[in-house]
Amino acid sequence: MRGPRSTGKGDLDGILIIDKPSGPTSHDLVALVRRLSGVRRVGHGGTLDPFATGVLPVFVGRATRLVEYHMADQKAYRTLVAFGARSTTDDLNGELLAGEGPLPDRAAVDAALGAFRGAIRQVPPDHSAVRVDGRHAYELARGGEKPVLQARDVEILELRLTDWQEAAGRRTATLEVRCTAGTYVRSLARDLGERLGCGAFLVALTRTASGPFLLADAHTPDVIREAFATGRWEGVLIPSDTGLEAFPPLTLGPDDLSGLLRGQVVRARVATPDAGTAGHYRVRDASGRLAAIARLEGGRLHPEKVFLSRDD
């Protein structure tokens, strides 16, 4: 796979996998990358709450046009859940209200997890970015209103209790979660506490994976600052089409490629016309550069995203 495209700082295309610290917002880190790179088009691949840490994919330059293909990516989290209280925000930043029921033991929590594995319906937190009549739910909640939020279908693909702690009347569980996009781990903790009758809330949350982007491959903001300060951004910027391996690569001849880059539909010349997710291909030029994302339909390639011009 070819490296990130660059013709100099200020003209970069690729993806940064940031290990987000607790405190800054996802938007803060996008602004940081925009400032360091000099690139105006920068976006992230899924918001993390300010208190949360972990994987935040940041798309730079033309790579921002590929974010939509990652919107349905599965996510993985490591979270610390405290039992015996409820939070107005479902995490440690909210007002805590003591729970009524007795504190559970590890066996009770482990048994309760079974109800949350697989396909479930989940109501987002009151303090979330879900829109209600054109306003964010958190805006209503902060103003003293109770937002009316609809339950949504999500799937918990994996849910494991990996550590249990008891000290001075405090009981916490470390959970490993793998889930579909749109799942709120804060809601999972809240609902687990309600099922146990004691209340629960998040103490810490780390995203360990966002689709193909893993925490082990992520860089701290300080490392990214250093990379850009020294002109060594190629050490942290990965190719724009990373994670799109489900779209087979396809090299077109000069005439077909020229037509596709002009937005024309061209005849497909592929051995496996049904390959790829929804018939998508990563079209490359003769040098291996990503030229376009094209959709195969009726034996023809339809350009969905074009990244090169005929002069590139």
Image: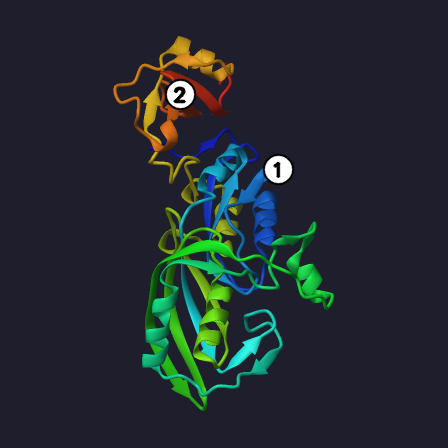
Residue 271: give its label: none
Residue 165 quadrant: bottom left
Q: Which residue is mark 1?
A: 40
Viewer-proximal residue among 208 and 198: 198
Is any part of residue 232 visible from this angle? no
- The residue under the point 70% across, 61% down is 140
Q: Position of residue 278 (x, y in %)?
A: 38, 31
Nearest the viewer among 211 and 30 is 211
Q: Position of residue 231 (x, y in %)?
A: 49, 41
Vertical relation: 286 (above or below) 105? above
The residue to which callout 2 is attached is: 297
User: Mark 1: few, some, or many residues within 10 Å (few <14, many ≥20)?
Assistant: some
In the image, residue 50 sits, relative to residue 33, either above or below, namely below
Q: Is residue 269 above or below residue 107?
A: above
Q: Position of residue 197 (x, y in %)?
A: 47, 80
Picture quarter with the N terminus: top left
Residue at (33, 30) in percent of width and height? 276
Give the amino acid type for the residue marked by disc 1 in the picture.
Arg
Q: Residues within 10 Å of mark 2 (few under 14, many from 20)?
A: some
Q: CA distance from mark 1 to mark 2?
A: 34 Å
**In the figure, is residue 29 to the left or right of 136?**
left
